[in-house]
Amino acid sequence: MSNDEDKILTNLRKGVLEFSVLAALAKERGYGRNLAHSLSERGLIASEGTLYPLLSRLRSTGLVDTELSDPADGRQRRYYTLTPAGRARLDGFRAAWVPLRDTVDELLETTP
Amino acid sequence: MSNDEDKILTNLRKGVLEFSVLAALAKERGYGRNLAHSLSERGLIASEGTLYPLLSRLRSTGLVDTELSDPADGRQRRYYTLTPAGRARLDGFRAAWVPLRDTVDELLETTP
DNA sequence: TTGCAAGGCCTTGTTATGCAAGGTATCGTA
DNA sequence: TACGATACCTTGCATAACAAGGCCTTGCAA
C-alpha cells in the first residue's frame, strides 16, 4: 500500500464493492475477468485478487447464480447472474447508502 | 452483529468515520463522549468502543491535538482540535470521496 | 452521609474486507 | 511449437469497526 490516498480509497471501497458488483450484475450478467476490468476502470477495485473471493462469497450466500459457458463458444467462462435475494440485498444497500452518503456530504459541505 | 442491514452500515462506516470525526472537529473542538453522542445520532458509529481507539490513532498520527480542560471547570475532559495535517487529510478524503460517491450513485441509478 | 446513577475515558478480543503476489490451465496465433 | 493473453483461483496480511466490558469521578437523592 503506497500512499495515504490509496488507503483512503481502500477503506471507502470496503463498504461499496460488494454492491457495486451486484449492481453491475443487475444490468447484465458478467464473468470474472470482465467484471474485474470494468470495476477496476471505475476505481472500485485495485486487483483481481479482491474480486474472486467476493464472487465466491456472493455465490455461497445465494446472492448470485453461476453457469459455465458452452466450451464450444470459444474460451470457457463462469457467468454470474443476480438472484432475487441478490436484488433484495441491493435494495437494502441502497436504503443504507443514501442517508449515509447525505450525512457525509453534509459534514463535508459545512466544513469551514 | 444482528442483521444484514447492520453489516451493510458497518462496512460503509469503515471508510468514512475517520473523516467524519475530522470534519466535525473542523467546525469546533470536541471531546470524546460529546463526539460519540453526535456521531451516534448521525448513524456514523455504533458504540463508544469505536471512537476512542480512532481518536488515539488520530492523535498519534498528528491529525489532531488534545488538551485537558481545567479541572476547575466542572468535569474534566480531553478536548480534541484539528491540526493543519488533519485538515490536509480531510481535503485528501474529499478528493477521493466525491468521485467514488458519484460512481456508486451512477451504478445504483442505472440499475433496472 | 451514604449510595448510586450518570459522565467521561479507555482496553481487549473478534470479525471481516480488501490487497498483493502469487499459481494453474487453456486458447489463439505467429 | 512456443508464447502471450485469457480466465480462474488461493494464501497470507493489514486494518477498521464492533461488542462488552472496566475504571474513576461527580452530583444528586434518599
Image (cartoon, coloured by chain):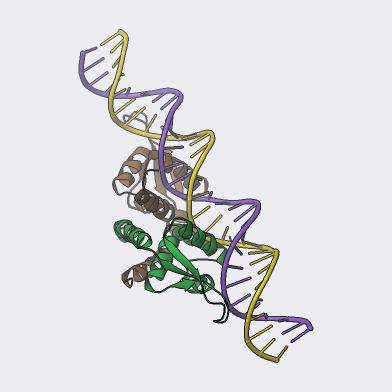
Chain colours: A green, B brown, C yellow, D purple
Determine which quarter of the picture holds residue A88.
Answer: bottom left
Q: Position of residue C24 (x, y in %)?
A: 69, 66
Q: Position of residue A86 (x, y in %)?
A: 38, 61
Determine which quarter of the picture holds residue B35.
Answer: top left
Instruction: Say if B48 sits above or below A38 in the image.
Output: above
Of residue A59 and residue B39, the one placed in the foreground of this image is A59
Residue under the image location 42 percent in, 53 percent down: B11
For residue B79, say whether it is visible.
Answer: yes
Q: Is residue A85 left or right of residue B62?
A: left
Of residue C1 and residue A112, the one placed in the foreground of this image is C1
Q: Is residue A70 left or right of residue B2?
A: right
Position of the N terminus of chain A, as image quadrant, is bottom right
Q: Position of residue C6 (x, y in %)?
A: 28, 29
Instruction: Say if B88 sits above or below B4 in the image.
Output: below
Q: Position of residue D21 (x, y in %)?
A: 43, 28
Determine which quarter of the picture holds residue C1.
Answer: top left
Residue under the image location 45 percent in, 48 percent down: B64
Q: How many numbered dots are placed on residues in this image?
A: 0
Of residue A88 and residue A45, the one placed in the foreground of this image is A88
For residue A108, say whether it is visible.
Answer: no
Position of the C terminus of chain A, as image quadrant, is bottom left
Instruction: Say if A106 sits above or below A66 in the image.
Output: above
Residue under the image location 48 percent in, 56 percent down: A60
Of residue A10 and residue A83, the one placed in the foreground of this image is A83
